[in-house]
Amino acid sequence: MKKRVIKIAALVVLFAAVLVISNVILNRGNDDQVVPLLSLGGVGVISVLSNVMPKLTHDMVMSYLNGDVKLSRQLQLSVMNLNKALFCEVNPIPVKEALNMMGWNAGAVRSPLCEMEPQHKELLRKELAAMKLI
């Protein structure tokens, strides 16, 4: 966890430098970096997590934008393991599998993608269960 915090801190510094020298609207597709990006002036997220936890993703962003940084940070940290599982293979393989596990019948992935590795599927199932999504 400490290494991840250091990496995120480095990204914060990098993004801050970009924002200082330009007037950029930031959106990011890394679900594990939503709150750090918002702290740099980001305005939203392009999210895989929102497919399986739309309310939490919405609440995480809106709580930050409404000034409740503590809540947004707590929400971000509460889904770190799930985010890791959702990105253990190329998108959209894990998210389709997650939706199928949740009963949404998202179907199989299309070629050239392939089914998840069994150990990754078990990791995803474990994290979905931990979040009470299955």
Image (cartoon, rainbow, N blue to C red):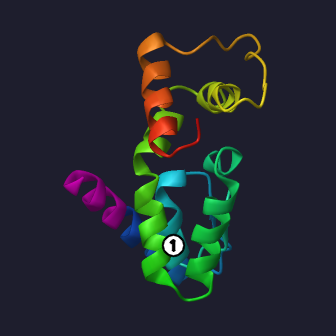
In-front residue for pair 19/85: 85
SS at mark 1 in the image:
helix
Picture coordinates of residue 6, whole percent (x, y): 25, 60
Picture coordinates of residue 97, whole percent (x, y): 64, 25
**Which residue has dot 1 on it?**
18
Q: 3 above or below 112?
A: below
Screen quadrant of the C terminus = top right
Picture coordinates of residue 19, whole percent (x, y): 54, 78
Picture coordinates of residue 38, whole percent (x, y): 55, 74
Q: In the rendered image, which quarter is residue 102 located in? A: top right
* Extreme residue in the left direction: 2
Report the span colored magenta: 1-10
Residue shown at 50% from the left, 46% from the top: 131
Total count of labels = 1
Residue shown at 67% from the left, 51% from the top: 50
Q: 21 above or below 85?
A: below
Residue shown at 64% from the left, 45% from the top: 48
- Report the side of 118 relative to 105 (left or right): left
Q: 9 above or below 4?
A: below
